[in-house]
């Protein structure tokens, strides 16, 4: 039968995340004379005050120790003490931080700037034109600073840092920094994901299924709207010989550095699998009985769907599962002549993320006035989604024929998906999906 997802705010009690190992005592080595000096955040419940963090989140920063010392990105402000301690742990005696390279201006990476500059006087801020404009807006000053353009190189000695501007991945100023000496690509928010890295920093140390699920949720929640700009960034990197991908959130990829790039590329192209998500809301159980008939039929056709109750599942998980599925069934009652409010929230986010290339089916119900069906059809038309017939609209509790119509909708959707082949091997669902 279908998998019903009820995502909460915390991981299960028996999940490894509940059984923490002691914090890493010394900053891990990412590459030659290159160290991870980031922090893990188990305190923030909602990323951007929107997205649940059941497995926490990391703010990755890196330090390169050469003739000149460069800090690549920083951390969220109130983790500054731990951040500075880690920097000082690897900073050679008599050395200071000469440069802070800012790949992305969001405060979870720049909130520590003002105090960092007091700890390391004379530290030069390195960024592109838009970065420096934002520094002025956020922190009032960007001096001393060094403005870089696409392809410019910062010479640290042995290490040569080349900059690649990647605007709108996912802010206007975003860029990536490539160390030509070690092959490390410091990719900013691109290729990152939710989840802390205190259980293991590198991709060969972690639960890849969990990490890919949290990457997908991060991508759909944060980056998905800018998929076309992600693809431009990926194209720019095709001839860059990176051997490590070091984003600002989530795992550092050294064993399989091309995997996060391939995943982001696939998700940006919206190359969905021939699978189905059923997202429904039901106030008194009438709509749910119709959903059961559709889900059962899909299961019998070998397409056991992921089923989300939109009144209980957080929208971040619904978005992630929809993003990798070609087929969607949306089911809800009319509420005050419009959509059931939790479904309205889901559709608003899907519209904002510019969802494309999906097959959708609709199941609606009403008591005394319709409205849900019209709203769902308008949503599909706005995003140019293909609607699979029949559209099921039921008054009250409906009749014995209505589950049959829902089964027919599911059959027609399954037939349309049958030519799609088998699911993509690198696609992962949300981490809390059973």
Image: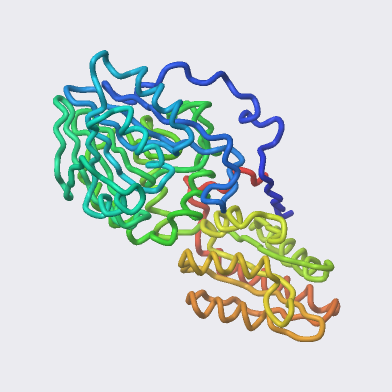
For residue 361, above or below residue 261:
below
Q: Position of residue 222 (x, y in %)?
A: 46, 54
For residue 208, above or below residue 360:
above
For residue 303, above or below residue 126:
below
Image quadrant where residue 275 sits: bottom right
Residue at 30 percent across and 44 percent down: it is 103
Residue at 22 percent across and 42 percent down: it is 143
Q: Position of residue 342 (x, y in %)?
A: 67, 65
Residue at 35 percent across and 38 percent down: it is 114
- Which residue extends farthest bottom? 369
Q: Position of residue 195 (x, y in %)?
A: 52, 38
- Which residue extends farthest top? 93
Please state if 213 lies on the left or on the right of 407 as rendered. Answer: left
Q: Nearer the viewer, residue 103 or 78?
A: 78
> Which quadrant is home to the N terminus?
bottom right
Please state if 352 lies on the left or on the right of 70 as rendered. Answer: right
Q: Nearer the viewer, residue 432 or 359?
A: 432
> Which quadrant is home to the C terminus?
top right
């Amino acid at each position: 039968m279908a998998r019903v997802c009820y995502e909460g705010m915390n991981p299960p009690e028996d999940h490894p995340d509940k059984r923490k190992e002691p914090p890493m005592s010394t900053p891990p080595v990412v590459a030659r004379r290159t160290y991870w000096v980031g922090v893990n955040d188990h305190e923030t419940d909602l990323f951007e005050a929107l997205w649940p963090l059941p497995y926490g989140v990391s703010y990755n920063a890196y330090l390169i120790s050469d003739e000149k010392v460069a800090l690549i990105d920083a951390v969220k402000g109130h983790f500054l003490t731990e951040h500075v301690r880690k920097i000082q742990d690897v900073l050679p005696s008599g050395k200071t931080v000469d440069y802070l390279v800012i790949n992305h201006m969001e405060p979870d990476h720049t909130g520590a700037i003002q105090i960092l500059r007091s700890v390391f006087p004379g530290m030069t801020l390195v960024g592109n034109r838009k970065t420096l404009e934002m520094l002025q807006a956020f922190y009032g000053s960007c001096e001393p600073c060094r403005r870089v353009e696409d392809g410019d190189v910062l010479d640290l000695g042995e290490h040569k840092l080349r900059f690649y501007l990647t605007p709108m991945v996912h802010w206007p100023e975003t860029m990536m920094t490539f160390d030509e000496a070690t092959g490390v690509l410091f990719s900013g928010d691109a290729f990152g994901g939710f989840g802390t890295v205190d259980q293991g920093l590198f991709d060969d140390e972690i639960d890849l299924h969990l990490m890919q699920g949290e990457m997908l949720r991060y991508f759909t929640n944060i980056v998905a709207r800018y998929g076309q700009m992600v693809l431009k960034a990926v194209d720019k990197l095709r001839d860059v010989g990176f051997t490590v991908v070091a984003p600002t959130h989530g795992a550092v990829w050294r064993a399989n550095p091309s995997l996060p790039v391939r995943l982001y590329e696939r998700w940006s192209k919206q190359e969905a699998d021939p699978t189905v998500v059923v997202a429904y809301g039901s106030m008194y159980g009438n709509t749910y009985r119709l959903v059961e008939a559709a889900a059962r039929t899909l299961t019998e056709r070998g397409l056991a769907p992921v089923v989300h109750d939109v009144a209980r599942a957080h929208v971040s998980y619904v978005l992630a599962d929809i993003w990798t599925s070609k087929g969607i069934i949306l089911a809800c009652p009319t509420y005050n002549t419009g959509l059931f409010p939790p479904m309205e929230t889901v559709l608003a986010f899907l519209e904002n993320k510019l969802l494309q290339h999906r097959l959708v089916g609709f199941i609606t119900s009403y008591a005394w006035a319709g409205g849900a069906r019209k709203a769902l059809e308008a949503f599909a038309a706005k995003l140019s989604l293909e609607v699979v017939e029949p559209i099921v609209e039921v008054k009250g509790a409906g009749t014995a024929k209505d589950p049959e119509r829902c089964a027919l909708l599911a059959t027609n959707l399954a037939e349309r998906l049958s030519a799609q082949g088998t699911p993509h091997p690198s696609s992962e669902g949300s981490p809390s999906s059973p």
